Amino acid sequence: MSDPRINERIRVPEVRLVGPGGEQVGIVRVEDALRLAQESDLDLVEVAPSAKPPVCKLMDFGKYKYEAAVKARESRKKQVNASLKEIRFRLKIDTHDYETKVGHARRFLTGGDKVKAMIQFRGREQQRPEMGVRLLERMAADLAEVGTVESSPRVDGRNMVMVLAPLRGKAEARKESQPKQRSGGRKGRERVDTQNATEVSNSVAGAMPEELKNMAKQADSE
């Protein structure tokens, strides 16, 4: 989106003015609105150009753009898009290959990605779509603890397709997969008893050994 019109770029006779705190000023001439903006050391920003008359607000436009950019950047950091992983197999698949494919799908779903399972039919296999449905339903049942059926089995040309969605979002899965931070501090740290603490003197004399104290007293008496 392009920047809104501000200050002298607003070329209309009058505007509905909103104050910097959101207060409604009312419909004023654009010259008066610009004067108020100058006196307040703010910008006149057109926030609703399609309104009749256009709505303008007094604000610090530079600060507004900076804060909007920071919010957009933080939003992009938090947003994690799930990708669609594709797994293909034949209708007549042996047990070992099937388990391997299911293992891949389980890893993708656990990581927060969707899985597109595709059966490729050959020759007369296209006349037995019910076999493909049973195979995909078996796969969905084997993955029920980590995924759910988002798109039921459907024929797509010479293939049959089913889409599984993860039960947890990708951001949640990524956060859980990160190693937990160890608690700081030394092992076996002893607690300090503050209930029966003795009074501590901050003076130098209070920290002197008794022998030195006695020597000082004798020197004073002499």
Image (cartoon, grey):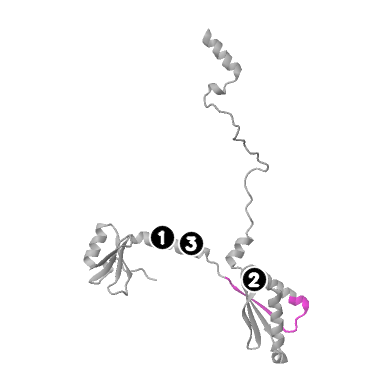
Mark with earlier residue (3, 1): 1
Determine the residue positioned at 62% across, 35% down. Answer: 193
Magenta part of the protein: which range?
82-98
Q: Is residue 32 magenta?
A: no
Between 76 and 211, the one lying in front of the other is: 211
Side (left or right) of 142 relative to 53: right
Side (left or right) of 105 relative to 197: right
Residue that protrudes farthest toward the front in the picture: 195
Q: Residues within 10 Å of mark 2 (few under 14, many from 20)?
A: many
Determine the residue positioned at 63% across, 44% down. Answer: 185
Q: Is residue 94 magenta?
A: yes
Q: Is residue 126 visible?
A: yes
Q: Which residue is mark 2?
A: 109
Determine the residue positioned at 58% across, 71% down. Answer: 82
Residue 67 circle label: 1
- Quarter location, residue 150: bottom right
Measure the alpha-carbon separation of dots 3 and 1.
Answer: 11 Å
* Element carrying mark 2: helix
Q: Are marks 1 and 2 in contact (CB under 8 Å)?
A: no
Measure the alpha-carbon separation of dots 1 and 2.
Answer: 36 Å
Q: Which residue is mark 3?
A: 74
Vertically, is 123 above or below 147?
below
Provide residue 47's location: percent of width, then percent of height.
33, 68
Between 124 and 129, the one lying in front of the other is: 129
Residue that protrudes farthest toward the top in the picture: 222
